Image (cartoon, grey):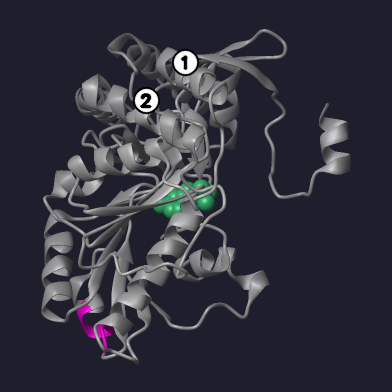
Amino acid sequence: MSDICKEYLMNTYKRIPVVMVRGEGIRLWDDKGNEYMDFVSGLGVNSLGHSHPKVTKAIWRQAATLIHVSNLYYIEQQCKLAKELCDNSFADKVFFCNSGAEAVEGAIKLARKHAKVKGHKNKYEIITAYNSFHGRTYGAITATAQSKYQESFKPLVPGFKYVPFNDIDAISSAISEETCAVMLEPVQGEGGVYPADEEYLKQVRKLCDEREILLIFDEVQCGLGRTGRLFAHQRYGVTPDICTVAKALGNGFPIGAVLATDDAAVFEPGDHASTFGGNPLACEVALAVLEVMLESAVENAYKMGEYFKDALIGLKRKYSVIKEVRGMGLMLGVEFSRDLGELVVDLRKNGLLVNCINNRILRFLPPLIVTKEDIDRAIAMLDESIEKLFNDGSKRR
Ligand SMILES: *Cc1c(COP(=O)(O)O)cnc(C)c1O
């Protein structure tokens, strides 16, 4: 299997030598019959767990009825989904696409057009934060202020400026006459699970209002229940003008969206489009996902998030190799003072899948339907592996 893959696939991923063949709830099985607890959720995607019955049913039903029609027609499921998203957020209008990067591109275009519509011909600059991640298309890698994603692909898109995250003075002095928007992740995901400070986001909102700049939140990862509220910014009590979502919206079926206020939603026919974006199948699936999220999964994510974080803090008290536990809801990061390659492999061999960032940060994104028993098991596995691999007097006594 890995031979064919290596021969025919572009070399874009350093892949783990495992082939998953089935999933159910928080569990995955590989082709050798090994069982895993999935605490990564396909990188924040399978938030309702694998093969959720309501999602599967929505796919079956809609696939047998109508998969795709073009956006030249009204699409009932798309309108319903837009209403559902607006009824449960700050937004008045929605645009649908197929991925996170596309949602970010849509947000960038919307912010630039908004400035033009308001009569500011030379307002086009967008400020983003160091260590951010916004996707892999050109606008999105330019917005992503990490050189490792940019270096080989220059020249980038003009009109972006970067500031340190959680530094209000930096953002205040970076804003110029040319600035049309600030874009931030309320909780930075790929960068290593760094939540924004509440006071910072409140101050950024105030600055944006004073300087007539749009505030964009990229909630592709931290949105849709991940932090224990439907949107991460709801936990902060700070409302953006534009918000991007994707990852968890289809529980694995590709769909993304740009949410905006009436004031910000300035697109007109011809400005922006997507062939697949918002087709009946994708939207029917997302409607099922939102229903389950609003019924129970988001609330469970809040409760289990508190429980999981406390348990991780318990491990930190026990092991001095753990430097910090951070995050919100079920988006949690544990930073170690040692390289984690061996730990991640050991956990996987014992049946726990976790993600690792920069070799030092464990990122946990379990499905929102995770239970206390699942978390207890994961903590016991972590405890055992840390004890085994780092047991050289690094225990706090
Ligand atoms: C994953 C991610 C993206 C990119 O999403 P894709 O679907 O991979 O294009 C954008 N922004 C954030 C915050 C993400 O975590």
Left or right: residue 38 versus residue 165 is: right
Q: Amino acid at mark 2?
A: Ala
Foreground: 318 or 271? 271
Q: Position of residue 40 (x, y in %)?
A: 47, 30
Residue underneath mark 2: 288
Foreground: 350 or 63? 63
Instruction: Name which quarter of the figure residue 382 lies in.
Output: top left
Foreground: 61 or 174? 61
Instruction: Name which quarter of the figure residue 30 lies in.
Output: top right
Q: Which residues are magenta?
A: 172-176
Q: Position of residue 371 (x, y in %)?
A: 31, 13
Q: Is residue 180 above or below residue 315?
A: below
Q: Is residue 84 above or below residue 176?
A: above
Left or right: residue 152 versus residue 306 is: right
Q: Amino acid at mark 1?
A: Lys
Asked if residue 367 shows in the view, the reply is yes
Find residue 15 and name its label.
none
Residue at coordinates 25% horizontally, 28% vertically from top-left?
A: 298
Crowd tier of the residue under label 1, counting other residues whose Cα lies within 10 Å: few below 14, some 14–19, many 20 or above? some
Asked whether residue 46 is drawn in magenta, I would say no
Crowd tier of the residue under label 2, counting other residues whose Cα lies within 10 Å: few below 14, some 14–19, many 20 or above? many
Q: Position of residue 10 (x, y in %)?
A: 78, 49
